[in-house]
């Protein structure tokens, strides 16, 4: 007996593709080299009554992958409460290599709404593409993405959404009916004029759903093509980003994963759809993770980090504590943070301008209580004996230690190992072992990662981290770090 919410006809199985190792070692040892490709730069607001977005707007990021005369534009995050779409776009931007063709990714179009877990702080951005008053707070953002859509190199536009339930052409029940949007490929009309790239919209969408339906995790998840016939009088869809692209003579599709799923399953189906469209557009690519729900979830949790002060301070964030206390940061001018994913931002905490909140999509993953310091730039690295071998350790590095680390004394500088109570002002020259650190001072919840700070008098010079070996680790239960909480469904559809 079929006990699914709605009857199925398309069976499927879970695919398993094995990719290359993740990018985390690169982020640890070569942060500066990796970040131009992977990261977005955000300014931290100085303490002030004004809201942060008024001082430093959270503009969207465009990440260009590959090189070719024709590009596929992929947009995520037009609505901030749809994490499947912006999470998938983030993985496309950071974990894919385009081997032939070009892909432009905007993973965070409505960034302020993503941070606030809101469909739209200033109304639904996906209903602002027909007419928009210059006084609208999102006027500049909409005009910028419209300009990108109109770019002569853009031949295909994919707009990623999370929709309610499961779209079905005929009413089956409250979750499976024509009013639902989840698990569908949206088109505004069957065709575009001859000569337009991928002009047969209905045929292209049908090929994508056919391919993805061979990779279903459950038969319930079957995808369908949903033609809104926008020009026939759908006044709401006339205002959408996809229809704007169609009116510019560009092939455009809305991709909808179901809000009934956890975020990693939504992102899995989004990437299945995106990959199918890329193949049809002649784009070849490879990714460095397995395209399964588990592989997607692991990729979303991996490679989380933030650096400050030109990488003199670096924090891995996969297992970060809820708060990092008295972190030395530059005084006197707005600090700048570089994050490892374009849907991450560092902003003053709401109602607490003395603290910085690190956001990852819809989640706040930790907060920082800064220790604002004058900076010293006269030293870039220190000499450390780690497990019997000497190393030159640059600031911003994570140094793996099995047993003991010892920072060599340097005239004019002092060392402060956080959580290591020696009773001395300068802890250079002392053996640093895991058992001598108070676990509640660790950066991570497992109690393996500790800060070593270097000062010249009262000026802060830089910091590196000691990561003690897993065999000695204090084990704690890790919480998931995903931007996943379903938001309210709009009456206007996707």
Image: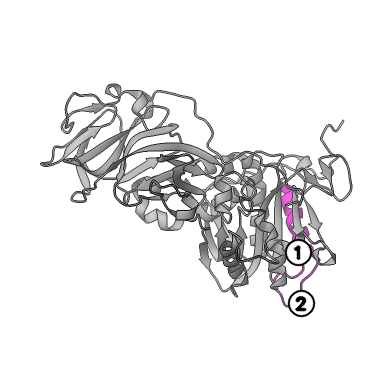
Q: Quadrant of residue 348?
A: top left
Name the element at disc 1: helix
Find disc 1 in the rendering and name its residue. Answer: 238
Q: Residue furthest bottom?
A: 195
Is residue 39 in view? no
- The percent position of residue 303, horizontal first and vertical second, equals 46, 44
Sequence-first disc among 1 and 2: 2
Find disc 2 in the rendering and name its residue. Answer: 194
Position of residue 147 relative to residue 360, above or below, is below
Is residue 412 in view? yes
Looking at the image, what colour scheme do you see? one colour
Q: Nearer the viewer, residue 118 or 469?
A: 118
Dot label at residue 121 = none
Residue 52 lies left or right of residue 378; in this view the side is right
Residue 172 lies left or right of residue 106; in this view the side is right
- The percent position of residue 412, horizontal first and vertical second, equals 12, 42
Q: Nearer the viewer, residue 113 or 409?
A: 113
Position of residue 217 relative to residue 125, above or below, is above
The N terminus lies in quadrant: top right
* Residue at x 66%, y 40% (from the top left corner): 486
- The percent position of residue 313, horizontal first and vertical second, equals 32, 44
Q: Nearer the viewer, residue 383 or 366?
A: 366
Q: CA distance from mark 1 to mark 2?
A: 22 Å
Residue 193 within the segment the image draws in magenta: yes
Region rendered in magenta: 189-215
Q: Are marks 1 and 2 in contact (CB under 8 Å)?
A: no
Position of residue 282 relative to residue 431, above or below, is below
Residue 372 within the segment the image draws in magenta: no
């Amino acid at each position: 007996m079929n006990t699914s919410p709605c009857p199925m006809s398309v069976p499927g199985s879970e695919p398993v593709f094995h990719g290359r190792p993740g990018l985390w070692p690169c982020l640890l040892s070569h942060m500066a080299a990796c970040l131009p490709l992977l990261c977005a730069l955000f300014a931290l607001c100085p303490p002030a009554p004004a809201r942060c977005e008024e001082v430093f707007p959270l503009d969207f990021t465009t990440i260009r992958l590959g090189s070719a005369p024709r590009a596929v534009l992929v947009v995520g995050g037009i609505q901030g409460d749809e994490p499947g779409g912006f999470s998938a776009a983030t993985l496309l931007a950071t974990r894919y290599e385009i081997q032939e063709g070009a892909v432009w990714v905007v993973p965070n179009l409505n960034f302020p709404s993503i941070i606030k877990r809101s469909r739209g702080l200033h109304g639904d951005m996906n209903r602002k593409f027909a007419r928009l008053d210059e006084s609208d707070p999102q006027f500049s953002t909409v005009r910028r993405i419209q300009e990108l859509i109109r770019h002569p190199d853009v031949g295909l536009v994919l707009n990623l959404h999370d929709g309610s339930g499961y779209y079905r052409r005929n009413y089956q029940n409250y979750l499976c009916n024509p009013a639902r949007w989840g698990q569908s490929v949206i088109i505004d009309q069957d065709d575009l004029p001859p000569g337009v790239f991928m002009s047969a919209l209905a045929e292209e969408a049908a090929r994508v759903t056919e391919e993805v339906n061979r990779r279903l995790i459950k038969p319930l998840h079957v995808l369908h093509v949903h033609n809104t016939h926008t020009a026939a009088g759908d006044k709401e869809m006339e205002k959408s980003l996809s229809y704007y692209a169609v009116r510019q003579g560009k092939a455009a599709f809305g991709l909808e994963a179901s809000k009934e799923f956890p975020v990693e399953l939504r992102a899995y189906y989004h990437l299945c759809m995106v990959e199918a469209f890329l193949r049809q557009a002649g784009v070849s690519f490879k990714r460095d993770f397995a395209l399964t729900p588990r592989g997607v979830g692991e990729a979303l949790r991996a490679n989380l980090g933030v650096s400050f002060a030109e990488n003199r301070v670096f924090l891995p964030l996969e297992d970060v504590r809820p708060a990092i206390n008295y972190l030395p940061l530059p005084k006197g001018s707005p600090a700048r943070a570089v994050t490892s994913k374009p849907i991450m931002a560092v902003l003053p905490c709401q109602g607490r301008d003395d603290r910085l909140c690190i956001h990852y999509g819809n989640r706040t993953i930790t907060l920082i209580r800064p220790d604002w310091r004058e900076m010293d730039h006269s030293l870039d690295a220190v000499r450390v004996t780690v497990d019997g071998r000497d190393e030159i350790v640059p600031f911003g590095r994570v140094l793996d230690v099995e047993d003991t680390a010892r920072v060599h004394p340097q005239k004019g500088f002092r060392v402060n190992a956080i959580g290591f109570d020696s009773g001395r002002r300068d802890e250079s020259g002392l053996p640093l072992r895991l058992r001598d650190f108070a676990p509640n001072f660790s950066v991570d919840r497992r109690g393996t990662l500790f800060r070593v700070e270097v000062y010249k008098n009262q000026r802060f010079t830089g910091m590196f981290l000691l990561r003690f070996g897993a065999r000695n680790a204090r084990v704690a239960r890790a919480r998931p770090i995903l931007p996943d909480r379903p938001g309210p469904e709009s009456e206007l559809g996707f």
